[in-house]
Each structure stands twice: as C-alpha cells, then as structure tokens.
Image (cartoon, rainbow, N blue to C red):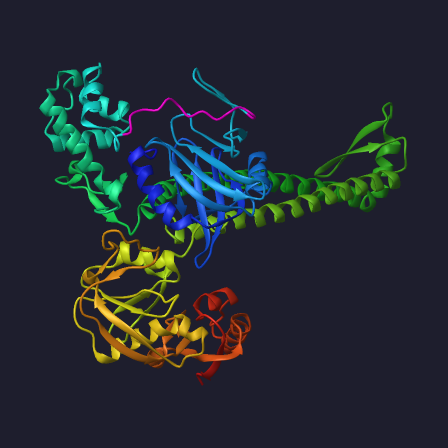
Amino acid sequence: MKESLSSVDIAVIVRELQEELIGARVEKVYQIGREEIRLKLHQKNRGSIDLVIEAGKRIHITRYRREAPRVPSNFAMLLRKHLGGGWIVGIQQFEFDRIVELRVKSREGELGLIAELLPRGNILLVDARGEILHPFRRMSFSAREIKPHARYERPPSRVNPVRMTAEELKLICSTSDRDVVRTLALDLGLGGVYAEEVCERACIDRHRRASELEDAEVQTVWDTIQEVLKPVVTGEGLRPHIVIENGERVDVLPFELCRYRDSDAEKIFFPSFNDAVDEFFTERIVERVEAAAQNERESRIAQYERILKEQKEALRDFQAKEAECRRIGELIYARYSEIEEILRKMDIKKRIVEVSLPGFTLEIDTSISLFKNASIWYERAKAFKRKREGVERAIEETMAKLKQEQARAREVAVAKGAIPEKRAVRTNKKEWYERFRWFVTSEGVLVIAGKDATTNEMLVKKYMDRKDLFCHTQASGAPVVIAKCNGELSDRGLKAIAQFAVSYSSLWKYGFYEGECYFVRGEQVSKRPPSGEYIAKGSFIVRGKRRYLKAPLGLCIGIENGRLVAVPELEKDRLELFVELTPDNELDKNSLANKIVEFFNAQGEGKAVTHDEVLSLLPPGKSRIKAKSA
C-alpha cells in the first residue's frame, strides 16, 4: 500500500497546484497532526482552499476538514507571523526530487516554504537569500545541517530523468552495482512502481544487473522513460485514479500503468490528481482518526459504566446504613423505658455495652443519656443521607455522560462509519465544473464559462473536447463558454448559451442591452500561434468558419433543486425562486447582493443563501432588479 508520493506523483501535483494556487492569499496556518500542517488559502473567484503538507509524505489540496487544535503550535504561529496575508507567487519541484517550494510574497519580502517529502522529511521556512528562518525540526546530515540561520542546502541531487540524455543513462548503468529496477528507482528517483513500469514496457528483466545492459537496451530503457514521463511533462494523457484490490485501496496514480491493466483491480477515476491523492491519503487518515475516536468512545463508555456500577454499589451501601442508623435511633426512643430498665440491672464495667431486645441487639454509650444516644444515631443517619444524596447527584452526572457517549456511538453506527462532525468532516464534494460559472440548458447540456484569463485557459486546455461548442464574444474581458455536447443544439439552446456569454462579458458593465458572440467547434480552437507571434494568457487562436449570434443581456439568480444558480433569462421558467437582472447604473454588486439575499432569506422554507454565494454569481458592473418571482 502506498504510503507517500513519488517524484513522478509530485511532478503532477505541482503542475496542478501551479494552476490552482498562484495568486492565492495565505490566511491561516494550522498544525493538525504530528508532522502535518495545513495552509488555509483564499483564491479570488474560488474562495477558500486548504493545502495540506505532511513532512516526508505528501502535499495536495484537500476537501476534508479536521478539527484544529485550540492552541496553535509554535511552528504554526511562526508560519502565521511570517506568511499571514502573503500571496503565493510560485510553486516548484526541485530537479524532479521529492522537494517542493512555495514562494510567498509577504510584507517581509519573498519567502520560501519548503516541503521535503523524502524519508525523514521536514518543512522549513527560508528567506529570499536561502537562509533558514524556522525549520519544523532541526536535523543534521553528513552533507548538510538544518537549523535556524543556516543556509538551506538540498540533499545531494540525483539525475533528473526528464532532462537526462541517453548517454548519461548509459554512464549510470555502466557504473551501477544494482539491478535495473533498483538503478532506475534509486539513482534516477523514479520510485519502485514507475521503475517497474519502465522495465515492463521496455521488456527488460528488472533483476538483471544494470551494468550488463547493452547499449541498444539502454537506449530502449531511455526511450521508455521518456514515454512513461510524457504525461508528466506535457499534461496530456493523465487519468488520475485510485487502484483497489480485494476491497482495499492500494495505489493512487496520475495515469494508467501496465501492472494493473490485466489484473482484477478496480479503478476509480478523478478529474484531477489532487482529488485522487486527497481521497486516497486523507480518507485513510480520517478512518484512523475515527477508529481512534471510536476506541476512545468505547473506552469512555466502559469507564462510565464501571464508575456507574461502583456508584450504585456505594448508593446501596449508604442507603442501608442511613436506614439502619435511623432505625436504631427510633428504636431507642420507642423502647426507652425498656432499655433503661435493662441498663439498671446490668453490672456496667464498660463504657459501650450491648443491650439485647427481642429480635435486635444495639450498642449503648453509658457515659451519656439515652436521648443523647438516639441523637447520635440520628446524626449518623443524616451523614449517610448527605453521602447518599452526593452519590445520587454523581450518578445523574455519570448517566448523562454515559448517555451522551452512547448517543454519539449510535450516530456513528447509524451513519455506517460516517465521520463525526467534531473530528473530521467531508465538505460537500463539488463537481469539477463548479469552480467555473455554469448552468444546464433545458435540453440537458452542461454549459461552463470561465471567470478570468486563468480559468479561461484551464477550461480550454483541460476540459474542452474536440466536439464541444466553443462560444466567445469580441468584447474585452469576455469569458470562454463551452457547451459539452457532441450533436447540434436547437436554436433556443444556442440563444441561451449566447445570452449567458454576453451577460458575463464587459458588455454588461458598459450598459449594453444586446451583444454578439460566435460559435465554433472545440477542434477549431488552438493555443498555437503562427510562427513568430505570441498569445497572451487566456487568449486563443480560432480557425475556420464561425457562426455569429446576437442575444439580449439578461441573467436570473435563483433556486434550482435546492441550490443557488445563475442562468440566462431564457431559462428562468425552471427556477423555483428567482431574481431577474438587467444592466443598469442603479445598484453596485455589493448592494445588489444584499437585496438578493434579503429576498431569498425572506422566503423561508430552507431557501437561505449567503452574501458571498450571491456575489460570486453576479455579472460585472452595476445592475437593476428587473423582476422577481411571485
């Protein structure tokens, strides 16, 4: 079972993080586990993002939340002090090694947060000169030392398999005293899984001595390494997935490998490698946390049951003693004359004597009166009564705690292993397209729009297929709009998409009431400019015939199937509640969002929405509320 990310895995993760996190602001830092920190980030147009780093093992975005310690650790406080409010300006992997650096532009200048994901890993903060400010732990090696004020030195570098030439590989193999698979795994840093994949694809016996390979075989191995690493370098051909064998998750991979091709292993695919890694590692951590929590609950239940048993035994003892003392006191009063007569006839030589009555024997203190004897027994009864009442209160408290723990245990059992909210909760998993603007047409076609140049680029490069419809306006700041369909759309569907595209363009901000956009197939869109030319981020080359269509600007913010959505005005009939907007110089986005929130929250029936939710759906510029649903 996989325990940590390999260099290949990290390369894919870093590639995705570069798309997701550049420009994100650092809000908080937490130390969740013994060697795990979590960065709470905020990315414009996406909101809150949690990045987890576990020394020696993994780095990825997570959708899971775990309860943070009430008192932050010293290391977390130091990172907050230096990184809080800073912006992530760069993410890189060092020479295909298991070391990742996040460059953060803070008020102190540019700092680096370095995650060493090697065995005996570490996390450390360095300044712009490479001097260590704060390490997670101090460490000393033969070639370097990790401590404050020392210059950060990376471990001795291995060969980078991405940049390695065939001649360099021949030299490595000829001087290696290991077999082929260990040479690839250790000397090139590919890791065992990918080293075995290279051997299998190259048809090379992995147990052969690397020094025994002929030049032609070394060339074959080099060619195969380039083939295996091509998805990592280009980003094409990635199919992130988790491998399950015999009901157990055994591996998480960015692309498919030969070793699982012909096996009975089940594969669960994900839209990104971050999602797959998060599911693979965090789910296991959550399961361990929950198992520990369940054991703790069971231990507390057993402890409370044991305490309750002891308290009930003590209660019965105090009840019996209270009753006994009270009965003796009452007996002395009731048989006063008879006891007095017995004492008068006795030859008293001791202070405490036993007086026998029919069916009963009691002790009498002859140094005091019988009334005083009775009072003493009554006082004893009162003392046992106070103890009894104290135990009864303690029993009530213990029973309340026991019921609380039993209720928690029942909740977990009913949920069939779901994570209790106080320990670890899974945030509502969003579909991949929910990071963009989107709606579904009345014909069931998914339509996605970018929010800025970064998401426009991501949408086209990562999610657009050749047969999808690409829609765009000529206005500056216009979103890329993609309709996920393989067939032709109806005129109504095209008009709805066109209305969506022009409404989120700068035409809205400038007060236009109508706009024009064009449609092409995905295969007509390219990022490759003519020779000698340059294309800015978020821009594309469109070749071939275009279909132009005009549409009025108009959007509706409303409730569909219990969730808040934004749809073109042509699709408003499907919404349960809605507010129809039109371009106007009446309300800015903040004031408009307040009015929309007030409208929806006034409806009740679980339709409550938040200001941020509404704000994220509004078009650019000022608007006017044209109509509201009845």
Image coordinates of residue 300 in percent, x first then y, are 52, 40
Q: Residue 278 vs residue 30: left or right?
A: left
Image coordinates of residue 627 in percent, x first then y, are 45, 84
Comparing 163 with 439, the one in front is 163
594 up-or-down from 389: above or below? below
Image point (65%, 39%), residue name? 317
Residue 389 visible, this angle: yes
Q: Give the range drawn in magenta.
A: 148-160
220 up-or-down from 400: above or below? above
Comparing 237 with 340, the one in front is 237
Q: Residue 379 vs residue 203: left or right?
A: right
- Quadrant (top left, top right, bottom left, bottom right) of the N terminus: top left
Image coordinates of residue 461 in percent, x first then y, are 27, 54
The verdict on residue 259 being magenta is: no
- Quadrant (top left, top right, bottom left, bottom right) of the C terminus: bottom left
Q: How many marks on residues?
A: 0
Is the stretch drawn in magenta largely helix, strand or loop? loop
